[in-house]
Image: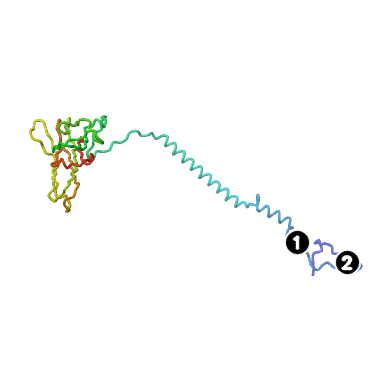
Amino acid sequence: MSYDQSYPFPQVFLVDESGRSQHSAQPPGLIPCWSFPPAQQRLRSREKSEGCMGIRPGVALIVLLLFLLVFAALGFEAYQIMNIQKELRQVKPETEVAAPQKQIGFYEPQISGEDKKDRAAAHVTGRIEVKHHPETLRWEPKTGQAFTSGGVAYRIEDGALQVNESGLYHIYSRVELIFGKCSSTSSFDHSVFVRRSGQSSPVRLMVAHRMGFCPQQRAHAFTTDSFLGSVQQLKKYDRVFVNVSHPQLLSQSHYGTFFGVYQI
């Protein structure tokens, strides 16, 4: 085998049994191979490829881009919030309330500065009579929930509610009767009428005739009632009354029998 004499080889010493070193006359049969760089050089090249703090440049670039996207999104949101606040400051508060449109078929009350206490209205409750029981009922104008206000007055002498202003009025009346011995023939009449100046006879506004309300068992007490209500056109100084055919059978409860009018 031939080899290049100019290539440097490390010296090889042979040691005999006596321990003395001798130069080898023959070059070694094996040629050492140093094809790989030293370990220290490989470590330096690896550190250069990994970059700063052991992070590769590609990964660091991706992380940097993500941070830039986050900050850009935060900045855009802050810009949008500032624009919204600016628009809200420029908007003037509306103090005027739009009036509702008029609807056909519905009553639209006229709002005025009058107090509710001055509105023409009255509500009177049943008056308990001990001896005298007239068919035209008398009322309590101040007991419990009873009241009179505005252009309606109660007339003590005849039990009428007098209106002092022409217009539309809602009139209502309820009576409660107790029949001690109720039978199939028991009945009663309940009516509301008005007296007007210049007219001799009263004008009936509402009337009810009740019968057949008793149960089949005879000689038993039974309570029944009647309610009337309607809207009427009344004139100034009209007097409204309530009649019952059996006033002696009226309930002693103030709230079972009542009568009222109010202007609409």
Q: Residues within 10 Å of mark 1 (few under 14, many from 20)?
A: few
Q: Is residue 263 above or below residue 4?
A: above
Amino acid, disc 1: Trp
Query: Which quadrant of the figure contains the C terminus?
Result: top left
Q: Give the quadrant of residue 84.
A: top left
Task: Give the residue at mark 2.
Answer: 15
Say left or right for 200 vs 128: left
Task: Give the residue at mark 1.
Answer: 34
Which residue is drawn at the image coordinates 56% and 47% (left, top)?
67
Q: Is residue 118 above or below residue 186?
A: above
Q: In this view, does 143 lie above or below 219?
A: above
| Label 1 – label 2 distance at C-alpha | 26 Å
Disc 1 or 2, which lies upstream in sequence? 2
Secondary element type, mark 2: strand
Q: Which of 205 and 177 is in front in this view?
A: 177
Mark carried by residue 194: none
Amino acid, disc 2: Val
Q: In this view, does 35 lie above or below 184?
A: below
Residue 85 x, y percent position in the rendering: 44, 37
Q: Which of 254 and 9 is in front in this view?
A: 254
Which residue is drawn at the image coordinates 46% and 40% (left, top)?
81
Query: Which quadrant of the figure contains the N terminus?
Result: bottom right
